[in-house]
Image (tube, rainbow, N blue to C red):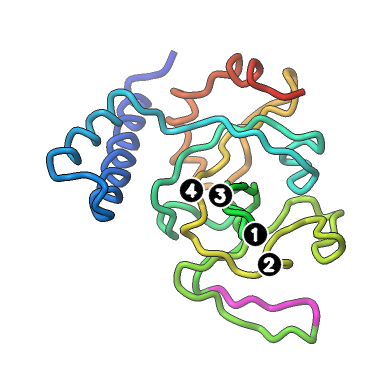
Amino acid sequence: MVSLSTWCRYLVHKIEYSFTLGWKSYKRGQVSDRELQDAVWKNVFQGKLTYLHWSKGEAMAPTIGEQGGTLLVRKIPSADPGRVFVGDVIVMKDPDDSDNYLVRRLAATEGYEMVSKDEKDEPFVLEKDQCWVLADNEKLKPKVLNEAKDSRLFGPVPMTGIVGRVIYCLRTAVDHGPVQNSHYSMRKDSPVLEVELDVDDMVKNHKS
């Protein structure tokens, strides 16, 4: 059973998410003043902070199984260095195909100096709202047949392309558990995981 303190922390996250999402729509002119208030409260009482995402391929093994996995993803309405952190496993828009999504680990954010192992590549600093993402699978070679398909291939990507953080992975019905993210993110996500995790639903939606 979820404790009262966990429910309170969860509710705070839900209100923050609902307001951020509503404000984003308001600034884009998608909702009016009155609609903004309604949208925020509707999200608080009816919306969820997570969704299920199927990930396939070897790029994120062993975090995600080589045969793929069903992921519980926490929604990120507005990605910035205060909401996602180095070490987080994130869901992002594919830089080469905006209709597709990639799951990668956030390796660096704005202000980081990037130094290549290849002496031919000049060091550079990530600019504001830029980030660097990597595949977990160290066996894959990034520039050979696009195996890893991460920033070593396509370079820095905008933070705005990040749509969520993976907080739980189901590889099989008997092999599942929380995803290792940054310490700060795991602490922030713990009440969301306790309230919204439904392993039976993940198993039901799993593509074996």
Q: Which mark is residue 154?
A: 2
Q: CA distance from mark 1 to mark 3?
A: 27 Å
Q: Which residues are magenta?
A: 112-118
Q: CA distance from mark 4 to mark 3?
A: 5 Å
Choose mark 1 or mark 2, whichever is in front.
1
Residue 116 falls inside the magenta stretch: yes
Closest to the observer: 180 or 75?
75
Q: Main secondary structure of the magenta part?
A: loop
Q: For the C terminus, which image quadrant?
A: top right
Q: For the N terminus, which image quadrant?
A: top left
Query: Would you name the residue on which mark 1 appears?
Result: 96
Residue 101, compared with residue 13, is above or below; it is below
* Sequence-first disc among 4 and 2: 2
Q: Residues within 10 Å of mark 4 (few under 14, many from 20)?
A: some
Query: Would you name the residue on which mark 4 appears?
Result: 184
Choose mark 4 or mark 2, whichever is in front.
2
Would residue 46 appear left or right of 124 to someone viewing this image? left
Query: Would you name the residue on which mark 3 appears?
Result: 182
Whether the residues at callouts 1 and 2 have beta carbons within 8 Å, the answer is yes
Q: Residues within 10 Å of mark 3 (few under 14, many from 20)?
A: some
Residue 158, compared with residue 127, is above or below; it is above
x and y percentages locating residue 62 in the rendered image: 78, 41
x and y percentages locating residue 58 in the rendered image: 80, 44
Q: Is disc 2 placed on a helix, strand or loop?
A: helix
Amino acid type at image mark 3: Ser
Amino acid type at image mark 1: Asp
Amino acid type at image mark 4: Tyr
Q: CA distance from mark 3 to mark 2?
A: 24 Å
Whether the residues at callouts 3 and 2 have beta carbons within 8 Å, the answer is no
